[in-house]
Amino acid sequence: MRLLDFCGIPNHGGSLELLVAYCPEPAVAAAAAGRPICLAVHVGSHDTGAVLWDAPRSRPVRLTEGHAEVVAPLVLPPAPGRYHLEVDAVVEGAFWASGLGVVVTAFEAVRSEDSSVVLTDLATGVVHRVPVLERFAVPATGYGRAASERCIEVPWALMHYRGEERVLDVGFANAELAHVEALGALGAPLLAGLDLVAASQPGIAGVQADVRMPPFSPASFDLIFAISVIEHIGRDNSVYVWGRGGEADAADGDLEAVRQLAALLRPGGRLVITVPFGHGENHGWLVQYDTERLERLVRASGLSLAGAEFYYYDGSWKGPVPAGRLSGYRYRVGDHSASALACVVLQQPVAVAPSRLRRVLAALGVGRVVATAVGALATLRRARALAGDVDWLWRRPVCS
């Protein structure tokens, strides 16, 4: 096995990937007996030992003469530290190559305080560095070769965090580990989660409820994330909620959801949404948006469109591109993945007094008094949030 490339987004829940040239060892090929062989990267900490053994898999290795290029996903903890990596082959339900006595290929990864990652190939001494991104961009040609749309959605969305104090994540219960860890790494004083499913995720004050009937007071949040969730609202959610019927309950459930989420935003607050995009489709458990339905979603929210970008998959993830280029892209049903994405930021307008009234208030010195009072109230609310007293957020008792 030989490392060809190492790339990705090291911060905000982005994907890291090792591109390796690999040919199954004779012992592995014989034991596989024609069954699919995948690669996985075991992660261990030099301080705490094993971190991740049953890691995400690559796509099955193509059994050809010579070496095949295989992308092995790497899930690296967000905490700074030195990690030991082993790339191992696996046949599901049967064996690991290391269990057959095959020598694994080892690397060392160092995550710095700024979240950048340095990878050292222990066999050759070759060093690769992946820097952090301050603003989202596809980091390299070939990014996301073996990944779902989450490798775009999660970092794109979370990079819109600007130090907001009250943050809500919708659909947190079934979120991937990288998503949950990256949310916690934002450092928001108050981080709440809303989902149809009751779940416990570290660092998230979880609430079980339908997003169309959110149990929060109006204007409760500064920032709301809805990453790959709006397309499921009102659809068949039996795959996510045990015992729930398999029928859609509202064709326009997504439109009602964004209306309710908009009402939860404070003045100037933002709603960050990602949805599958391209050719309009209804798959029962989700809808894929086309331009017309996406425009309906924005209008239904009553919010201002603060930004939108569009990405697509063509052997790897690319973009941003104009929305019109993606009208023929269809959902990859077999992979349960999108072929294209719409990433949208909607904003609640900031209430501004009429200019004449502002001049009058300024002449009377009222503005300074009001600003002082508002500042004192904000300080009090910050203190309560930091102390963990979040009862004032809820309209009524909820199951958490």
Image (cartoon, rainbow, N blue to C red):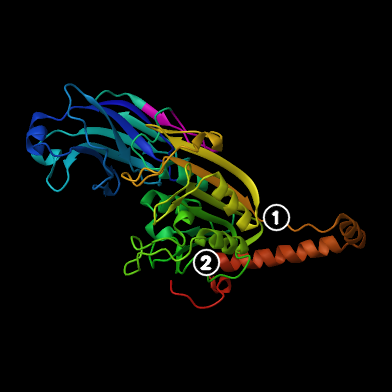
Residue at image location 34% in from the left, 43% down from the top: 75
Q: Position of residue 16 (x, y in %)?
A: 37, 37
The amino acid pointed to by label 2 is Arg
Q: Which span is picked out in magenta?
A: 128-140
Q: Is residue 162 visible?
A: no
On whether residue 139 falls in the magenta region, the answer is: yes
Please state which of the two labelled residues, at mark 2 or mark 1, is closer to the viewer: 2
Sequence-wise, the earlier of marks 2 and 1 is 2
Looking at the rendered structure, the secondary structure element under dot 1 is loop
In the displayed structure, does residue 108 sit left or right of residue 390? left
Check the image and report above or below for 183 versus 245. above
Task: Please identify the residue farthest to the bottom as the structure is shown.
Answer: 397
Q: Position of residue 20 (x, y in %)?
A: 27, 28
Quarter of the image with the C terminus is: bottom left
The answer to whether marks 2 and 1 mark residues whose Cβ atoms lie closer than 8 Å is no
Q: Nearer the viewer, residue 153 or 360?
A: 153
CA neighbours of label 2 inside 10 A, class few (<14), some (14 to 19), many (20+): some
Check the image and report above or below for 309 versus 393. above
On whether residue 52 falls in the magenta region, the answer is: no
Which residue is denoted by mark 2 in the rendering? Answer: 212
Which residue is denoted by mark 1 in the rendering? Answer: 349
The amino acid pointed to by label 1 is Pro
